[in-house]
Amino acid sequence: MEERDKKHKKILVTGGAGFIGSHLCERLLDLGNDVICADNLYSGSRENIEKFFKNPHFEFIEHDINKPLKIDALDEIYNLACPASPVSYQFDPVFTVKTNVLGSLNMLELAKKTGARILQASTSEIYGDPLSHPQKETDFGNVNTVGVRSCYDEGKRCVETLFMDYHRERGVDIRIIRIFNTYGPNMALDDGRVISNFIIQALKNEDITIYGNGSQTRSFQYADDLIDAMILMMQHKDFIGPVNIGNPKEMTVKQLAERIVALTGSSSKIVYLPQAQDDPKKRNPDITLAHEKLGWQPRVDFEEGIIKTINYFAEKLEIKTNVLVFATAYKPFLGPAEETLHSIIEQMGHLNFHVITARLDKNLPKKEETGNITIYRIGVGYSIDKYLLIFFGWMKAKKLHKIHNFRFVWSLMASYAALAALIFKIFGKKLPHVMFLHKGDLEGKALRKAKLIFPFYKLIFKKSDAIHVIDDAMKNKLKLIDKDLEGELMPLEKSLAASKVREVHKKIIGKYNKKIERTK
Ligand SMILES: NC(=O)c1ccc[n+]([C@@H]2O[C@H](COP(=O)([O-])OP(=O)(O)OC[C@H]3O[C@@H](n4cnc5c(N)ncnc54)[C@H](O)[C@@H]3O)[C@@H](O)[C@H]2O)c1
């Protein structure tokens, strides 16, 4: 048989159907390896790995690692199998200890037999409620041996001991990493971890529950950063660890809740419940060793990672908020205001945008769907469509509202589309309305026209709950129409613009919710 190209290895991932395991399988496959995923689906799911089933280099074995696993040849083993969230590891604590101790023993034996290098996914929990801050690999930890979290914490401590003894006594090639809080797509919806809890509560506009006063700190690393480190560690020729892998950017749990509320545009309130048992007050990795030995440090910014995670949860929960947009012209006729809207839509994947626009070209389809945007084109395909939009756009919006139950309405520029939006708002659908303006909209001809139909414009602006302007000059032009008009300046940078929109929407939705509460 041809000798195997060692760039392409045969790798076993235990717990590969879990959150981190599924990201690891994906990366290992992308690197051209043969991957065997062994998982008993205790807390992981088939859904996480379904997309690899067609790949001939992927094999799934439904297997409990508490029983020995027979595989003849292996180059590497990543040992991730273990219930990892408090909800799942406390559900059957004896199983948790068993998986840690007996399961890991089985995997160490397999490594010994096959000569494979084996990496243990250990945890920051081995530090318990830490006595030093940030936590260094040399800290021995402050762990309760008899508490409800001990099955996990002590179980993981024992695995580290087993790994070291198999290495010293039996010559097994080991690696140990201590993973700090990690988040990202593929996290289980019901795992009760702080990130998933907060995102789900925020997306559902339910109270965000903080255990304790929220001053306890955590640091969160995005899954991609962890996978980078795992692979670097496995490839390192002689550094066995243990090594901390986490993101040292620390935040309080309260700050985390506030960020998630802001990023989801949620109307959730933050509420405080009694602190959970043995909940560490501080958690922050010292990653100097990882940096020195592996040249690794996290690269994914919190906002970038959390937006991807929010989008994943919104998709899973199928509770995408629907936003109605009125635009006189839209794709393929993209002006600066439409371009800005477009970049905001890209950043707000947890929202579905329904854009009602004039058709203006008879070759364009009446309905078009791409990603999280659906475009509805009104009219016959000529410039008369702009006028038709006012009435037929409004009718279309009424119909769509029955199906999609919009949370707010945007209109691009103060024109025919804005009139349709205004009528939609005035006649029955009391939804928050946001105007989006670019300078071209109130310049030259447009300004002269605006002056002619001043009362209309005044009404459109007055009825809007917020006005976003794309440049400063527009702020002053608004005053020409009405001296009391204020426009929120829209930052040009994509993610900043999206944050601004979320902030404004949050305020507006809060205001509307209050109105609804008051009328009860
Ligand atoms: N996510 C984090 O923040 C974090 C932090 C520190 C350490 N870790 C460690 O990383 C690993 C993966 O964690 P995760 O967050 O992906 O959790 P997860 O629960 O999503 O994944 C664990 C996987 O192991 C499987 N499993 C459990 N017991 C098993 C058994 N006896 N036999 C076979 N499969 C079994 C589960 O079905 C699941 O697919 C765990 O070992 C965990 O302790 C995770």
Image: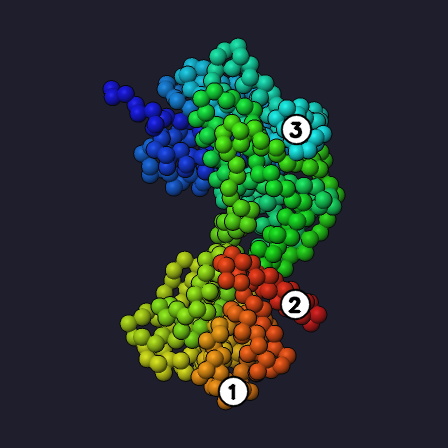
- Is disc 3's CB within 8 Å of ligand 1? no
Percent of width and height locating residue 494:
49, 58
Please indicate, yes or no, whether residue 235 appears anywhere in the rendered image. yes
Q: Which callout, 1 or 3, points at the residue further toward the start of the chain?
A: 3
Q: Nearer the viewer, residue 377 or 456?
A: 456
In this view, the residue farthest toward the top is 169
Residue shown at 70% from the left, 41% from the top: 216
Q: Which residue is mark 1?
A: 451
- Where disc 3 sits, the SS reads helix
Q: Amino acid at mark 1?
A: Lys
Q: Which callout, 2 or 1, points at the residue further toward the start of the chain?
A: 1
Q: Is residue 25 above or below residue 3?
A: below
Q: Amino acid at mark 2?
A: Lys
User: In the rendered view, does 421 fall on the left or right side of 207?
Assistant: left
- Where disc 2 sits, the SS reads helix
In this view, the residue farthest toward the left is 1
Q: Nearer the viewer, residue 366 or 33?
A: 33
Q: Which residue is mark 2?
A: 511
Percent of width and height locating residue 156:
59, 25
User: In which quarter of the view is residue 7 placed?
Assistant: top left
From the viewer's perspective, is the residue at label 2 or at label 1 nearer? Answer: 1
Pointer 2 with pointer 3, Cβ within 8 A = no
Residue shown at 53% from the left, 10% from the top: 169
Pointer 1 with pointer 3, Cβ within 8 A = no
Q: Mark 2: give few (<14), some (14-19) or many (20+) Cα within 10 Å.
A: some
- Where disc 1 sits, the SS reads helix
Q: Which residue is mark 3?
A: 127
From the viewer's perspective, is the residue at label 1 or at label 3 nearer? Answer: 1
* Cα gap from disc 2 to disc 1, whole angstroms: 31 Å
Q: Which callout, 2 or 3, points at the residue further toward the start of the chain?
A: 3
Q: Amino acid at mark 3?
A: Tyr
User: In which quarter of the view is residue 10 placed?
Assistant: top left
